[in-house]
Amino acid sequence: MDTAKKVLVIDDNILDVMEVEKYLLAAGYEVSKLASAHGCVAKLDYERPDILLVDIAMKHLNAQELFDSIRHSREHEELIVVLFSDLEAETLQSICVEHDFHGYFSKSIGLDQIGAFLDNFYREA
């Protein structure tokens, strides 16, 4: 791939954000961050990431509203949405299936594997 791999991380747990950023940078990703879903669409418009990595369990997150606004935007038709959470894998999988998200990454797997996991989405493209 000729261009940089770009990911936007939305998570209200700053310690998780710092750790995942460390591993993503080491894996060659450009990383943008938000601590809440407020301003997400504007940040997506500005940063133009390939992947949105979002903690679906964040407080005050209206996931349906957020994802509806992303899906209805032509600029983000190719955006890969990956759930990123401490929720049980079965719960994350069912949310992905229900809302047609691209995948999920359980934080309990170990954040050191996040770069390799996201790389799979580039191979599929």
Image (spheres, grey):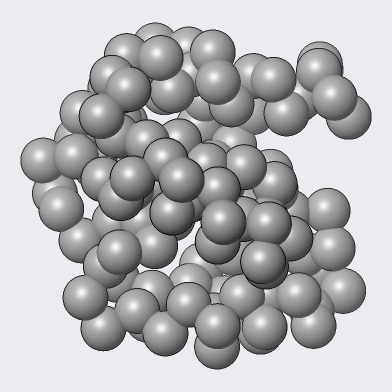
The residue lying at 54 percent from left, 13 percent from top is 116
Q: Residue at x 59, y 26 (%)?
A: 118
Q: Relative to residue 109, is residue 80 drawn left or right?
A: right
Residue 29 in the image: state x and y as whole percent.
52, 25
Residue, far front: 90
Does residue 90 appear in this view?
yes
Q: Is residue 4 visible?
A: no
**Nearest to the observer: residue 56 or residue 36:** 56
Residue 86 in the image, given as x and y percentages of width and height: 26, 45
- Looking at the image, residue 69 sits to the left or right of residue 43; the answer is right
Q: Residue furthest left?
A: 15
Question: Which quadrant, please, contains the N terminus?
Answer: top right
Residue, x 48% and y 77% (percent of image)? 63
Whether residue 97 is situated above or below residue 90 in the rendered picture: below
Determine the image quadrant of residue 88.
top left
Which residue is at a point 73% across and 28% down the rendered structure image? 121
Report the front residue among 24 and 58: 58
Q: Position of residue 93 (x, y in %)?
A: 55, 48
Task: Tell me where residue 20 sits by quadrant.
Answer: top left
Question: Left or right of 106: which side holds 66?
Answer: right
The C terminus appears in which quarter of the rendering?
top right
Q: Quadrant of residue 62?
A: bottom left
